[in-house]
Image: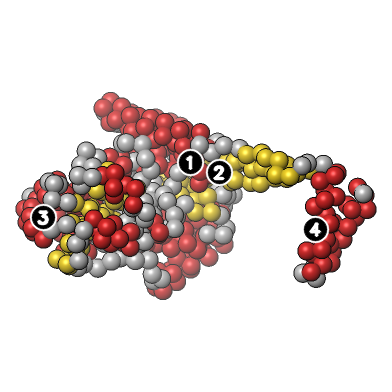
């Protein structure tokens, strides 16, 4: 393996200053409710409406400001997400088996009751995030989805975001950003029902708020700055690979951008092409920083080493621009979402193809996948048995309990022995 370019890896680490700021904000928000929400909204977003919740009239006025093509395109994207989530749900089957005579064990999938969805704004109004958390929740059977999105500073809502949230199935929409939004959804504040799961990406304060609120409710995952890794062999197109790397680099100055290829010649061609495209890129101010600081280019000695390097990186998004896609598909293990062949690209997954774009970052793909319909379902087991089966199980259970000195446990088994023998 040869290192051509070695940028920084942005891994999850505790930021004590951010932790302190968020902790103090959450304490204030828990104690002072909507008064604190309003205080922070004025301070950070110059936003102080009569009501943070959008009325039906306001929602329809917002949608009316969009052109017909924008509405149709959003519906196209959401239809793809909905269809895929429904197909995923079909794989989650209930189970009931008789493991021993008279012993019936099973599980069922039960949707959580309420979900809080955060649709980020900031540098880019990422209204495509609406369908990624709202639609799978609704397909799973969640009754109540509360949505928050930050205002355009001092101006209010972004119409395309409101349209996306409404069409995805949001039950209530609030124009609130950052930590206060998550506090509202988690605590309820007498305004909404406290949610069971919080979903959505955001800046470091949002990520920290989710981390601190975990336990109060569930979370989807701790998603940090976005990442792309491309594995490319010499049959790949350097210009296309460079284009896809820059597609993620524009997200954030901390975006992770990595190329693993199989020859130094291809690496140099891609770097040259990337620099050329970067010079003409409208979002160069961001993309250039992330490529300069975080860009990584490795030359692997063979496909297996390329796979090993990729699995160690465990990227959020993984593209494979290689001739033998099947070989890589079978062996790769650690990624948030895999894009197979040059015909697909991360932007498809982010916006329109139907897979979810809320994905693990910072090597979390080693132990989790991304958000999906199953996240909103609790897989709950149950058991039932005949008296004869209870008698058989009770004898073993009583001996095991007594061996652990858990005598009251043992008594619950013994009384059944006495009842059914």
- Graded by Cα atoms within 10 Å as few (under 14), some (14 to 19) or many (20 or more), the crowding at tag 3 reads some
Where residue 420 appears, x then y in whole percent? Answer: 91, 47
What residue did someone put label 1 on? 373
Q: Residue at x 40, y 39 (%)?
A: 131
Q: Are marks 1 and 3 in contact (CB under 8 Å)?
A: no
Closer to the chain start, of discs 1 and 4, is 1
Question: Which numbered disc covers residue 266?
Answer: 3
Q: Nearer the viewer, residue 239 or 65?
A: 239
Picture mark count: 4
4 or 2: mark nearer the eye: 4
Q: CA distance from mark 4 to mark 3?
A: 65 Å
Residue 317 appears left or right of 237:
right
Q: Position of residue 334 (x, y in %)?
A: 36, 55
Q: Indicate which disc residue 377 carries.
A: 2
Task: Give residue 103's quadrant in the image.
Answer: top right
153 up-or-down from 91: above or below: below
Q: Quadrant of the N terminus?
A: bottom left
Residue 113 horizontal/vertical position (percent): 59, 42
Q: Which mark is residue 167?
A: none
Among the two numbered marks 1 and 3 on one chain, the one whose residue lies closer to the N terminus: 3
- Vertical order, 98 against 275 (above or below): above
Q: Residue furthest bottom?
A: 16
Q: Residue at x 41, y 49 (%)?
A: 370
- Residue 163 position within the rendered picture, expressed as x and y whole percent measured from the top left: 37, 34
Task: Look at the image and tell me whether residue 189 can be seen.
Answer: yes
Labelled pair 4, 3 in contact (Cβ < 8 Å): no
The residue tagged with tag 2: helix, strand or loop?
strand
Mark 1 or mark 3, whichever is nearer to me: 3
């Amino acid at each position: 393996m040869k290192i051509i370019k070695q940028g920084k890896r942005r891994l999850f680490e505790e930021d004590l200053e951010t932790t302190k700021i968020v902790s103090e904000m959450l304490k204030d928000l828990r104690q002072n409710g909507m008064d604190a929400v309003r205080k922070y909204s004025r301070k950070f977003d110059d936003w102080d409406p009569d009501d943070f919740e959008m009325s039906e009239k306001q929602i329809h006025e917002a949608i009316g400001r969009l052109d017909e093509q924008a509405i149709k395109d959003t519906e196209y994207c959401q239809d793809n997400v909905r269809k895929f989530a429904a197909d995923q749900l079909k794989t989650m089957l209930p189970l009931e088996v008789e493991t021993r005579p008279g012993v019936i064990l099973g599980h069922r999938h039960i949707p959580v009751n309420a979900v809080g969805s955060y649709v980020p704004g900031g540098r880019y109004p990422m209204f495509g995030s609406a369908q990624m958390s709202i639609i799978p929740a609704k397909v799973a059977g969640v009754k109540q989805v509360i949505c928050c999105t930050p205002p355009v500073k001092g101006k209010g809502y972004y119409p395309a975001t409101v349209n996306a949230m409404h069409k995805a199935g949001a039950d209530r929409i609030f124009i609130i950003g950052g930590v206060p939004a998550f506090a509202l959804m988690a605590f309820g504040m007498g305004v909404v029902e406290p949610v069971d799961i919080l979903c959505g990406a955001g800046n470091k304060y949002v990520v920290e708020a989710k981390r601190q609120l975990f336990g109060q409710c569930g979370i989807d995952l701790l998603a940090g700055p976005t990442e792309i890794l491309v594995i490319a062999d010499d049959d790949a197109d350097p210009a296309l690979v460079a284009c896809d790397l820059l597609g993620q680099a524009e997200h954030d100055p901390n975006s992770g951008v990595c190329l693993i290829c199989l020859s130094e010649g291809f690496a140099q061609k891609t770097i040259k092409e990337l620099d050329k495209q970067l010079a003409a890129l409208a979002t160069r101010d961001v993309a250039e920083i992330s490529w300069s600081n975080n860009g990584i280019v490795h030359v692997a000695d063979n496909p297996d080493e390329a796979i090993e390097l990729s699995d160690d990186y465990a990227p959020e998004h993984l593209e494979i621009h290689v001739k033998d896609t099947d070989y890589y598909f079978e062996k790769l293990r650690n990624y948030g979402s895999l894009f197979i062949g040059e015909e697909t690209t991360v932007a498809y997954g982010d916006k329109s193809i139907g897979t979810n774009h809320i994905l693990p970052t910072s090597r979390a793909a080693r132990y989790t996948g991304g958000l999906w319909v199953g996240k909103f379902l609790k897989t709950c087991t149950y058991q039932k048995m005949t008296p004869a089966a209870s008698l058989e199980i009770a004898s073993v259970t009583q001996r095991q309990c007594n061996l652990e000195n858990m005598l009251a446990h043992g008594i619950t088994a013994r009384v059944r022995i006495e009842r059914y023998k």
